Image (cartoon, rainbow, N blue to C red):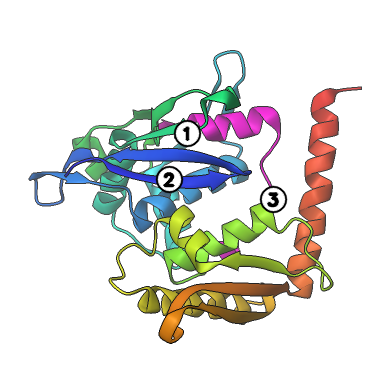
Amino acid sequence: LGKNTATFQHRQRTYSRTIQPAQVKDLDGEERFYYPSATEELVEDALRKLAADQQAGFFDKPNYRSGVVFSLYALREELKNRGHSRSYQEIVLSLDILSGSIIEIVPLEPESGEGLLRSPYLPSLVAVSRTRLKDDPKAKWAVQFHPLVTGSIDEVTYRQYNYHLMMSHSTQLARWLHKLLVLKYTFADFTKPFETRFSTIKRDSGLLESYARDRDGIQALEIAFRDLKERDILLSFERRDITGPRKKILDVVFQILPSLSFIAEAKAANKRLSDAKQKALGP
């Protein structure tokens, strides 16, 4: 497998994202190349939850590192409790992929003053031996989180969200949309709908490239939005097609209204972020 490159936008700035797959020993013992996928995303989210829940996380500000100490048993139970059961071998494979895959982010506007960021998803993985794993799945492992996660902790830019609800989605696309709304729809209100486009989601998520026809990707996106509505994240969403000659669909605009519970969670997250920033500034 070669490198996978795409562009995305963040806060009105354009970046290039390149992912180099990990070469790992597969479940059958053969060496193969893997990009991080939905399972790796679930494992990474569960690791961050363990760091927050069990006071097993660490933040080393002087050396700019953060991470978590955990057991495979605890990680497997966390995934199982959220409806995403995986075997110990599958979890170890995911950890190998996350620690072996490298993501590189480069701003396409040099005048922004930002530079290159290149790192594995998990820069450090301390593991027990495979032999000991069979005897003691509760043996301790440790991972170091990606520098962007550490930066978010250091600069207090992370946001509170409903982890249990996010993990309940059946598709990676629905989870991505949920996180998008948490990060961007901070002003959630019945009088302030949120708008996004199919083309924007396709560009920034990278999750719709596998569809040969945009029509199929749009349908998958509608299904994901319905998932969010069924789980009381959205009150409603409306679709407006932008068409060209012969009514060919050029793009689709989705207008979203939040549920009461999402509005309450957004306000709570805003207050928690404000309090955390105030605490970081000190008396």
The residue that mark 2 highlights is 7
In this view, 81 is above or below 69: below
Q: Where is the N terminus found, in terms of image quarters? A: top left
Q: Residues within 10 Å of mark 1 (few under 14, many from 20)?
A: some
Q: Secondary structure at mark 3?
A: loop
- Asked whether the residues under the numbered discs 1 and 2 touch, taking CB atoms below 8 Å apart as contact, a structural biologist would say yes
Does the segment drawn in magenta span residue 206? no
Q: Residue at x 37, y 73 (%)?
A: 214
Q: Where does residue 231 sit, x and y in percent of width and height?
A: 61, 77
Which residue extends farthest bottom?
246
Closer to the camera, 223 or 274? 223
Q: Amino acid at mark 2?
A: Thr
The structure residue drawn at horizontal position 58% and vertical position 44%, both measured from the top left corner, is 10
Q: Which disc is residue 160 wearing?
A: 3
Quarter of the image for residue 155 reads top right
Helix, strand or loop at label 1? It is loop
Q: Is residue 217 among what the camera can see?
A: yes
User: What residue lies at 70% left-to-right and 66% top-to-bottom?
Assistant: 194
- Disc 1, disc 3: CB below 8 Å? no
The residue labelled by disc 1 is 108
Residue range highlighted in magenta: 142-166
Mark 2 vs mark 3: in front: 2
Residue 232 position, x and y percent, is 67, 77
